[in-house]
Image (spheres, rainbow, N blue to C red):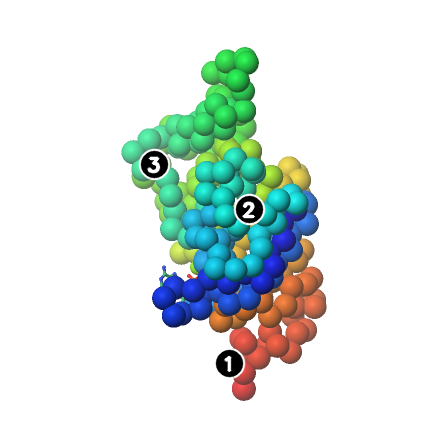
Amino acid sequence: MLRVEGIQKSFEDFKAVSGADLTVEKGQLVAVIGPNGAGKTTLFNLITGQLKPDSGKIIFNDENIGKLPPYEICRKGIARSFQIANIFPRLTVFRNVHVSVLSQQGKSTRLFRPAQTLAVEETNRILENAGLSDKAEDTAGSLAHGDQRTLEIAIALGNKPQLLVLDEPTAGMSPEETTATMELIKRLADSQGLTILFCEHDMEVVFNVAQSIMVMHQGVTIIQGGPDAVRNSSRVQECYLGGA
Ligand code: ADP
Ligand code: MG
């Protein structure tokens, strides 16, 4: 579904991403891990069009999307969440997701006016899936941090993505919130067949859920493989143990 080849991105003279490769198969749950500053967020910004690559390819469904603006990439089926939650804090939880569902329908239905009820049903379904139904009428800004991050995932789901890209979905969460969020991500991948790419700075969090793990270090891909291959890689151990 997604293939990133030799992607590079510099800020002034600093190479934030200097040769990253990544493959995401349809239906897979893929994690990108690496220490702070490894280039994970920059890589995700390149994939979703917030940044343009200096060189390299980003192929999504056989099309090079490396030069497209974010809204076109979103339209092609990639939705994302950010490392810092992006929600409408003064709107209700329901309305946050409803707006996203309506904008998705607006771009997909031309002949038949989308029935409001359809959008409401779809919104309720997403809230149910995300475990936010009982908070639907709460103001988004009043939610606990973990629920705000979950809401952001729900907003992304409103876009009916083929590929969901999550930047540190558990950042700043309590251990309980982290467990619940990882379960939600796993459920979305398993029961809905959604393809999910996420990044994490905590290695342990990902090993239980990810089918494929890509390790980044100083802007470069060290390895991509299954959990066992990654765990046993001496290069990975060097990166995490400081190369001693
Ligand atoms: P990660 O998400 O893995 O922690 P980032 O992709 O955020 O890493 O950052 C990679 C490196 O690029 C860091 O050293 C960071 O300081 C630098 N960087 C990121 N964005 C910018 C920017 N807009 N301008 C300058 N340097 C940046
Ligand atoms: Mg980051």
Ligand 1: which quarter?
A: bottom left
Front residue of 19/40: it is 19
Q: Which mark is residue 64?
A: none
Q: Residues within 10 Å of mark 3 (few under 14, many from 20)?
A: some
Q: Residue at x 43, y 52 (%)?
A: 51
Q: Secondary structure at mark 1?
A: loop
Which numbered disc, 2 or 1, marks the residue that appears first in the sequence?
2
User: In the rendered structure, which amino acid carries the disc numbered 3?
Assistant: Phe
Circles 3 and 2: CB distance less than 8 Å? no
Front residue of 17/135: it is 17
Which numbered disc, 3 or 2, marks the residue that appears first in the sequence?
2
Q: Secondary structure at mark 3?
A: loop
Residue 210 in view in this figure: no
Q: Residue 241 location, x and y as percent?
A: 53, 79
Provide the residue designation for mark 1.
242
Q: Residues within 10 Å of mark 1 (few under 14, many from 20)?
A: few
Q: Residue at x 33, y 31 (%)?
A: 91
Residue at the extreme bottom of the image, as rendered: 244
Q: Cα distance, mark 3 to mark 2?
A: 28 Å
Question: Which quadrant of the figure has residue 143?
Answer: top left
Front residue of 214/75: it is 75
Provide the residue designation for mark 3.
88
Front residue of 161/126: it is 161
Q: Which mark is residue 65?
A: 2
User: In the rendered structure, which amino acid carries the disc numbered 2?
Assistant: Ile
